[in-house]
Image (tube, grey):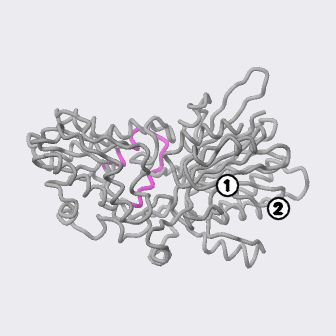
Amino acid sequence: MNQLIYDALLLLQHRGQDAAGIVTAMGTKFFMHKARGMVRDVFRTRNMRALPGTLGLGQVRYPTAGNAYSEEEAQPFYVNAPFGVVLVHNGNITNAHALKKELIDIDRRHLNTESDTEVLINILAHELQAAAHDLPLTPVEVFKAVSAVHRRVKGSYAVVALIAGYGLVAFRDPNGIRPLCLGSIEVAGKDTEWMVASESVALEGNGYHLVRDVAPGEALFITLDGELHSQQCAVAPSLNPCVFEFVYLARPDSVIDGISVYHARLNMGETLAQRVISTMPPSDIDVVIPIPESSRPSAMQLAQRLGKPYREGFVKNRYVGRTFIMPGQATRKKSVRQKLNAIGMEFKGRNVLLVDDSIVRGTTSREIVQMAREAGANKVYMASAAPPVRYPNVYGIDMPTSTELIAHGRTMDEIRDYIGCDALIYQDVDAMKRAVSSLSTSLAGLEASCFDGHYITGDVSPADFEAMKTQRAAQPQDEEAGDRGRLALPNPST
């Protein structure tokens, strides 16, 4: 089991490189190891040997809230009562501060970190205790506890937890903002084995079959003998997945809520091409070059639509972390040249259209445009497959303050001048939504708050943004707020 979880985390390493953790269970005892760093660095042979058992869960952390430099805030989290519960979660609890006060003043529970994951596990533990009147714990009582969690918790959350001696519970917020899917595998002579993960690639890469996505507000309970129970636990759930998953975060070979991430990015390239054609004569463009890696599908489709050559003009160093989630602007700026290197022959004397998946802070884009000019480009145009990022994101993407967003409060000309390109073309918000939603008939909408300013949970106020700004300003200069991860969550293997 520990090897299966390790392999799943490797497949989801793109979702977070700050920290990693694994918990396994044998009987009623948990075995845990977590630390800061990449999966391959956190887990050595001695660590794996200390993780016995036939079920477990794991997580890779992507920092957005808490203290990124504290290993104590790496997931999974553990509480010993009732039963013993370990939990990992992907998302961001928007009412964590109010819940923390409730837990301390009313529920009489102790919190030891600033992590909203600790808040969430204590809420779940309290509601399990309230629901479980008799032993043994039943699926009905588990679902009653999850229903209570949904009533109390606001924000985005995809959760997997182990209950000692009983099994695994997984649930998703009522808006379905963060992804969660279920897979299975048939093993000769054994019961069906199940796995739950953020992305289908973690299932398929380990030989599991994608069964379905966990519905918004739904809870799964898988017993120790592999019996699967499910129930809708929320009032009026609706499917509104985070559009940034399709723009940037997810792997292109994943399928989220029935939508191929790769196909969505091809569609974004198609609609972006229409924007380019309406903005400038395509004859002014000699070559289309993607900024690696998630912009490639959009750039390929755009080039085909324009009838222009598609070329790889940058080589990426795969061993440098994502720049827009790296701590500190100075570190971020320095890392761009370490991360990308230009192939001079693709730029020299040409009018180049660079395509990126999105432009968040503008720091990386500015450096890349300068690299293209230094490589000999005649003119450098920049196109973004996503619309301008104008608003803070509070649901698990690291862009919490408006002052860090290049598009916030600036005109298109001001953004272009800052980046230093000769022309700047952004995707249209409605076109981006159509590019994704056209691939599914089950979506109620898309969570696109960082583009359109609409916060679907209805509990986000200007005061919250000010609090985030104050918290962030209190961090050391080279520190990024942090404790939001992405999960690889295998479950009972009987």
At x 67% / y 54%, what residue is drawn? 76
Mark earlier in primary sequence (2, 1): 1
x and y percentages locating residue 192 in the rendered image: 73, 29
Q: What residue does disc 1 label?
A: 76
Magenta-drawn stretch contains 432 = yes
**Numbered mark located on residue 189 in the image:** none
Secondary structure, mark 1, is loop
Query: Within the image, what quadrant is residue 198 found in?
Result: top right
Q: What residue does disc 2 label?
A: 81
Relative to 472, 380 lies left or right: left
Query: Within the image, what quadrant is residue 412 found in?
Result: bottom left
Depth check: 269 or 430 in front? 269
The magenta segment:
431-450
Q: Determine the CA span between mark 2 and mark 1.
A: 16 Å
At x 44% / y 58%, what residue is drawn? 325
x and y percentages locating residue 342 in the rendered image: 25, 44
Task: Give the amino acid type for the residue marked by disc 1 in the picture.
Answer: Pro
x and y percentages locating residue 163 in the rendered image: 78, 51
Give the answer, above or below, for where 457 lies relative to 309: below
Label 1 crowd (10 A; few <14 / some 14-19 / many >=20): many
